Image: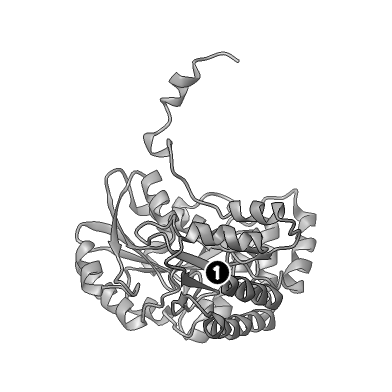
Amino acid sequence: MGGDTESLKSQVRKVFEGGGYVFATKAANIARDAGFTNPARLASNENPFGTSDAAINAAKEALCSGNRYPDETADSLVRALAEYHGDCGLKLNVVTGVGMDGVIENVIRTFIGAGDKVVVSTPTFSFYNLAVTAQGGVVENVRRREDFTVDVPEFVGACRGAKIAFLCSPNNPTGTITPAEDIEEILKGLLKENCMLFLDNAYVDFCDTDYRRLMKDYDNLIIGRTMSKAFGLAGMRVGYAFVPDWYLPYYKRAQTPFALNNISIAAAVGAIGDREFVKRYVNHVKEWRDAFEAGLKKYRMYPAGANFVMIDVAPQKSDDVVVKLAKKGVIVRSCASFPTLGDTFIRVSIGDSWENEMFLKAINEI
């Protein structure tokens, strides 16, 4: 091979010389080495019920069109999502992306250039920071209160001079629900600063708080959603968002062409039609969240509105507890990689019943 690789490396932007998204893979290797071929997988907030038969059948049929480009507008999916959300009484503008990540990247692409300020409510999903930095923007993190609720005046104040702010509710990894009234207060404050709010609702299916009505009155609101969780399509990478009328053409111009493939689109439409599948899983999550709270003997669990819970394992360190649980065949997520959170928290997904029972037994033995 020719060329000076060190000189070529110098051409890569400095921001990518380290860091990157932290995946929960180490624990799986530890469980395997401990002899568990089928461990309890409670690290990635996946739907343990699998994928709806309606989605699978639709995806199989779509494989026959693998030689054709997908509909660039994903029109069948957009229409299905609009109908699904018709219960809120509003006509919502729906856009799609390759997972929530793809939606976030598209939104950032339309607003952020070199040096532009973005505010993020933290601790939270690290991809906001990664995507903003990749676009040349500058992130200002605003810490939540000690109980992980949002200090509304502080958050709004930090948004002076920012183009867009990110807030996740229910929040990942804390599970905290920000009341709709607080979000409305934030939107009012951000309007005065000419700032957009991206409200990440990836886990909103698992709580009783509805933010969709806010789209009617606030043109600075974008609500991100995903089909990875309640719909069981994590492997299909289907994200979507509700956007204001004025913003719709800008999003479409910035979007990667043919982003969603035929199989993902078909599977998503099929999944939307199987409402009983979603309802069964959501009820399962709510029941087991209560069971986790009742079943934990030694550690504090924080209130959660998601398909996971966050637990403080102090005085132990989260990384150590992850290893101990993995050796017992239970894979959970250490939250030590989440900026500003600290090193004593773990995130535990609500899995199948046997997985949840296995976790409770293991955590209470540590």
Residue that sits furthest to the top in the current view: 2
Where residue 227 sits: x, y (%)?
Answer: 59, 68
Q: Is residue 289 left or right of residue 248?
A: right
**Residue 139 versus residue 231 in the image, above or below:** above
Which residue lies at the image location 66% right of the left edge and 70% below the top edge?
269
Q: Specify few, some or many for label 1: CA neighbours under 10 Å numbering under 14, 14-19, or 20 or more.
A: many
Which residue matches tag 1? Answer: 348
Residue nearest the observer in this picture, 287 or 10: 287
Q: Nearer the viewer, residue 235 or 196?
A: 235
Report the amino acid beneath label 1: Val
Query: In the rendered picture of this protein, how many numbered marks are placed on residues?
Result: 1
* Residue 211 picture location, percent across and down: 41, 79
The answer to whether any part of residue 74 appears in the image is no
Q: Residue at x 34, y 53 (%)?
A: 111
> In the figure, 7 relative to 262: above or below?
above
Between 143 and 130, the one nearer to me in the picture? 143
Q: Residue at 55%, 52% (x, y): give it.
A: 23
Seen at 61% across and 85% down, the residue is 283
- Out of 315 and 276, give the one closest to the viewer: 315
Is any atom of residue 53 visible in this view?
A: yes
Residue 168 appears left or right of 46: left
Percent across and percent down for residue 155 are 25, 67
Is 84 left or right of 343, judged from the image as shown?
A: right
Relative to 128, is 79 on the left or the right?
right
Q: Which quarter of the figure is the N terminus placed in?
A: top right
Q: Residue 150: x and y, percent?
A: 30, 73
| Position above or below: 11 against 288 | above
Asked where in the image residue 126 lies, by quadrant, the reply is bottom left
* Colour treatment of the image: one colour
What secondary structure is found at the residue carrying circle 1?
strand
Q: On the rendered image, what quadrant is the C terminus found in?
A: bottom right
